[in-house]
Image: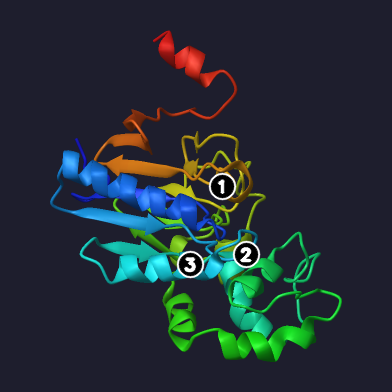
Amino acid sequence: MSDLTEGRRIYAIGDMHGRLDLVSAMFDRIRRDLSRRPHPQPLVICLGDYMDRGPECRGVLEALMALRDSALPARFLLGNHDSYVSAYLRDPDWYDRTYHWLHDAMGGNATLASYGVPDASDLHPAATRDAFAAAFPAEHMAFLDACELGFQIGGYFFVHAGIRPGVALDAQERDDLIWIREPFLSSSADFGVKVVHGHTIVPEVEHHPNRIAVDTGGFRTGRLSCLLLEGEEVGLLTEAGPEPLPVNAGKPGWRTLWMRR
């Protein structure tokens, strides 16, 4: 039997969006699991979108930096929301989607507020640029700049948003890796690896044959999810401990079908 995680036990955490309370609780949960079930090669993977929408974006980034500097190995992916910090500082009037970063729908105003810059608005985005530039520490920018776009471990590819079907992993474009939804989400193609991603909110973590969606919308649902991968095993790390996550989990009625097996 092949080892899909190359000897590691992987904890992959979905989108955080400024919810320091959920992040701190999840890190505690991971450490408790490792205390109960020690493993020689644990790895925490954070799937991106640390910033925006939630009230404690600065606190989340500081918690991630503390994790990076701890004895627990971790890797950090760049989310589309994280990418907007540097984009805003370069040009506060620029945006590349329907809404400006400071619009309520994007939540950049919450990021600025967490750094002590209140009342940021997409109506006057340049008005708060300099104050944010002065308040945003260089080490925080260095952390975001060092975040990865995607990487493969064994039979899994970890990325914030997804990949473009039909394109080799080493030829994927940055915009797709941090932004894509379709045609990735509806694709039934065999990608050669199982893609683990966040970005698109799902009611429950979804385990498809070719991908696993981990973003359960913690900033508004209060549910931050952690995927647990170890060899052939796929599960969720719940408050009560590991729980199996079979293929097709997350689809309507899957729990009833699973219990009947």
Secondary structure under tag 2 reads loop
Q: In the rendering, which numbered label is found on residue 247?
A: none
Q: In the rendering, which numbered label is found on residue 59?
A: 3
In the picture, the quarter occupied by the N terminus is top left
Task: List x then y, in percent, for residue 220.
Answer: 64, 46
* Kind of residue indicated by mark 3: Gly
Whether residue 156 is visible: no
Q: In the rendering, which numbered label is found on residue 218?
A: 1
Q: CA distance from mark 3 to mark 1?
A: 16 Å
Q: Is residue 209 above or below residue 184?
A: above
Q: How many marks do you count on the picture?
A: 3
Q: CA distance from mark 1 to mark 2?
A: 12 Å
* Kind of residue indicated by mark 2: Asp
> Counting residues from the N terminus, which is met first, the one under dot 3 or under dot 2?
2
> Residue 53, located in which quarter of the rendered image?
bottom right
Out of 1 and 244, give the one closest to the viewer.
Answer: 244
Residue located at (28% from left, 35% from top): 233
* Kind of residue indicated by mark 1: Gly
Q: Is residue 94 left or right of residue 57?
A: right
Residue hosting label 2: 52
Q: Nearer the viewer, mark 3 or mark 1?
A: 3
Q: Are marks 1 and 2 in contact (CB under 8 Å)?
A: no
Task: List x then y, in percent, for residue 232.
Answer: 27, 36
Out of 124 and 89, give the one closest to the viewer.
Answer: 124
> Counting residues from the N terminus, which is met first, the one under dot 1 or under dot 2?
2
